[in-house]
Image (cartoon, rainbow, N blue to C red):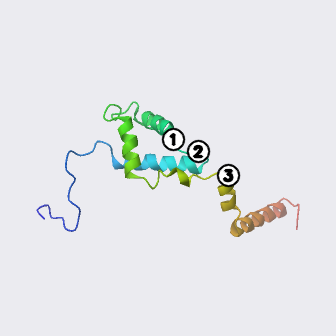
Amino acid sequence: MKRGEFDVSPLKRGRKSRVPFNLTKSLATHSTMMQILGEGEALRPKMMATIHDLADGTKWNEAFSIDWVYRKMRSEHPEMMNPVRAKNHEDRRVDWLMYKNLMTWNARAKKFLIDIGFGK
């Protein structure tokens, strides 16, 4: 009430975190993209190397532990770090083979063949 804030959660106790929330969210998003692209699960060693590369040569290099960033990312964004949602080739093929996608592809192929004079 003294701060002029109503209907909000109280401030967390202790010092402010050095790890920015946007960093952990970006890393979690990156792990999701790795899984969707078919690079497999975003395993701990691969993510630790990514975090190390991101911090190397910046002011964040010695500011925090890479292991701490990884654990914080896992705790703040568990829904994004779920390896079960990784897509394999079969999943991507099933997603692509939908009626709308096939009709769009056929329409473009027909237009292309007509444009080059191969069909009417």
Kind of residue sitting beneath label 1:
Leu
Question: What residue lies at 11% left-to-right and 62% top-to-bottom?
Answer: 2
Looking at the image, residue 29 sits to the left or right of residue 97; the answer is: left
Question: What residue lies at 49% left-to-right and 47% top-to-bottom?
Answer: 30
Q: Secondary structure at mark 2?
A: loop
Point out residue 4 in the picture as x, y percentages from the top left corner: 15, 64
Question: What residue lies at 83% left-to-right and 61% top-to-bottom?
Answer: 113
Q: Secondary structure at mark 1?
A: loop
Q: Residues within 10 Å of mark 2 (few under 14, many from 20)?
A: some
**C-alpha gap between disc 1 and disc 3:** 19 Å
Which of the 4 quarters of the picture holds residue 67? top left
Residue 40 badge: 2
Outermost residue on the front side: it is: 84
Does residue 43 show up? Answer: yes
Kind of residue sitting beneath label 2:
Gly
The answer to whether the residue labelled 1 contacts the one labelled 2, judged by CB atoms less than 8 Å apart, is: yes
Question: What residue lies at 41% left-to-right and 52% top-to-bottom?
Answer: 77
Does residue 23 show up? Answer: no
Which of the 4 quarters of the picture holds residue 95? bottom right
Residue corresponding to mark 1? 43
Kind of residue sitting beneath label 3:
His
Residue 89 badge: 3
Which quarter of the figure is the N terminus placed in? bottom left
**C-alpha gap between disc 2 and disc 3:** 11 Å
Looking at the image, residue 120 sits to the left or right of residue 88; the answer is: right
Point out the tag, 2 or 3, that comes first from the N-terminus: 2
Figure check: 22 above or below 120: above
Point out residue 53 in the picture as x, y percentages from the top left corner: 45, 34
Q: Residues within 10 Å of mark 1 (few under 14, many from 20)?
A: few
| Foreground pick, 20 / 38 | 38
